[in-house]
Amino acid sequence: MVQRETLDMSGALPMKLLAAHLALFAAIVPANAAETWICTFPGLISTMTVKERFEVRAADVLREGQVVYRIVENNERSVTATYSRAQAADTAITVGTLAIDKPTGNFVLGVMVPGAPLMNKIVAGKCQKAQ
């Protein structure tokens, strides 16, 4: 009588596949994909100092839970991102940029509106990584 070996699918192989998938996912998703920064800077409209929350997600930065900036670069040194609003013909084209120097916490935020030079503004501030 010939004895056959059978593959036990209940344990080792499915666990190895799961571990391989998790390792692949961890390699694709950046380690700093869920950072939150609290930044203080002069207001864009008034000179009053404001404090805002910037949530760095996988592909974008969410400013105060409202304005979505698309990440241009996110690494151990910095996060830089931009947004654009130019849908309706009766509203101003608006472009915004932000940059956070992660080691120092230095921050810059800019807003540009073509044809409205008084609305173009760049402010610098300081950020702290939220715990």
Image (cartoon, rainbow, N blue to C red):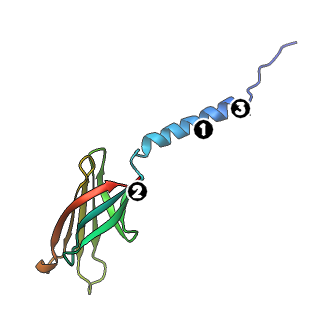
Q: Secondary structure at mark 1?
A: helix
Is disc 2 placed on a helix, strand or loop?
loop
Residue 97 percent coordinates (x, y): 24, 64
The disc, 3 or 1, on the residue closer to the chain's N-terminal end is 3
Image quadrant in which the N terminus is located = top right
Query: Residue 64 placed where, x, y %?
Result: 37, 68
Q: Which residue is identified by label 1? A: 18
Q: Residue at x 66, y 35 (%)?
A: 14
Q: CA distance from mark 2 to mark 1?
A: 25 Å
List the single residue furthest toward the left: 117
For image coordinates 60% across by 38% down, the residue present is 18
* Mark number displayed over residue 11: 3
**Tag count:** 3
Q: Residue at x 27, y 64 (%)?
A: 40
- Residue 63 image-quadrant placement: bottom left
The amino acid at mark 1 is Leu
Residue 49, numbered label: none
| 111 sits left or right of 58 in the view | left
**In the drawing, does residue 13 fall left or right of residue 27?**
right
Q: Amino acid at mark 2?
A: Arg
- Quarter where residue 57 is shown: bottom left
| Tag 3 near tag 1, CB within 8 Å | no
User: Could you give the CA–CA distance between mark 2 and mark 3, rounded to whole angstroms?
Assistant: 35 Å
Report which residue position mark 2 lands on.
57
Q: Position of residue 46 (x, y in %)?
A: 20, 78
User: Does residue 98 sit above or below 86 in this rendering?
Assistant: above
In the image, 58 versus 131, the foreground residue is 131
**Between tags 2 and 3, which lies in front?**
2
